[in-house]
Image (tube, grey):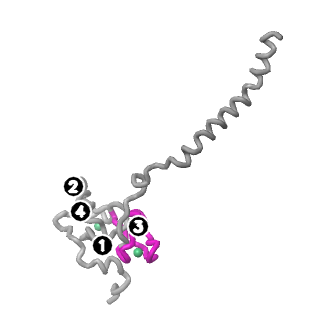
Amino acid sequence: MPLVTQATPAFRYKPSETIDGLLQVCISYAPFGIYWKPDKSQEEEPRTQCPYCSFQLSETELVCPECKNNLPYCIITGRHISREDITTCPKCEFPAILSEFLKLLESEEVCPMCSEKIDSQNLEKAKDLERILHPEEGADE
Ligand SMILES: [Zn+2]
Ligand SMILES: [Zn+2]
């Protein structure tokens, strides 16, 4: 038997061998896929406290899964506020994360919400957090 006639069928079956080979690669990589997970701590968003119930939720979450409150969000970052480090725009009174607002004012001078010129001297820690958290209550008193 000449070598050529053997080589030809072998060559013709090559495509399926290639698929088998690919499958083999997939199978051998499968455990890798199952066990290898990206480092969650790097991937997950930082968690901050719900200002209503102190539940830890990701900082871009705007509805607390625990107390179901709609959370007021920072006009600078769009992240929900927590009970700390909160200010309100002196002009439009929308809540913002104080440190983020101060950071913004280093490069821009206006509030992103009302476009009014804001002096960082006028930004102070929100005194009345309850009014931010419950704007509908006492609004008409
Ligand atoms: Zn909550
Ligand atoms: Zn404003």
Sequence-wise first label, 1 or 4: 1
Mark 1 surroundings within 10 Å by alpha-carbon count, few (fewer than 14), some (14 through 19), many (20 or more): some
| Residue neighbourhood size for the residue with mark 4, other residues' Cα within 10 Å, grouped as few (<14), some (14–19), many (≥20) | some
Q: Earlier in the sequence, mark 1 or mark 2?
A: 1
Which residue occupies the extreme right position in the image? 1
Task: Identify the residue shown where x is 56% and y is 49%.
Answer: 34
SS for callout 2: helix
Q: Which amino acid lies under the numbered mark 1 shown in the image of this protein?
A: Arg
> Which of the pair 93/29 is nearer the observer?
29
Task: Please state if 69 lies on the left or on the right of 96 as rendered.
Answer: right
Q: Earlier in the sequence, mark 3 or mark 4?
A: 3
Question: Do the CB atoms of the residues marked 3 and 2 lie less than 8 Å apart?
Answer: no
Residue at which label 1 appears = 83
Which amino acid is tagged 2? Glu
Give the mark toward the camera: 3 or 4.
3
Q: Which mark is residue 29?
A: none
Ligand 2 under 8 Å from disc 2 Cβ: no
Residue 57: image tag: 3
Image location of residue 28, percent across then percent down: 60, 39
Q: Point out the frontmost of discs 3 and 2.
A: 3
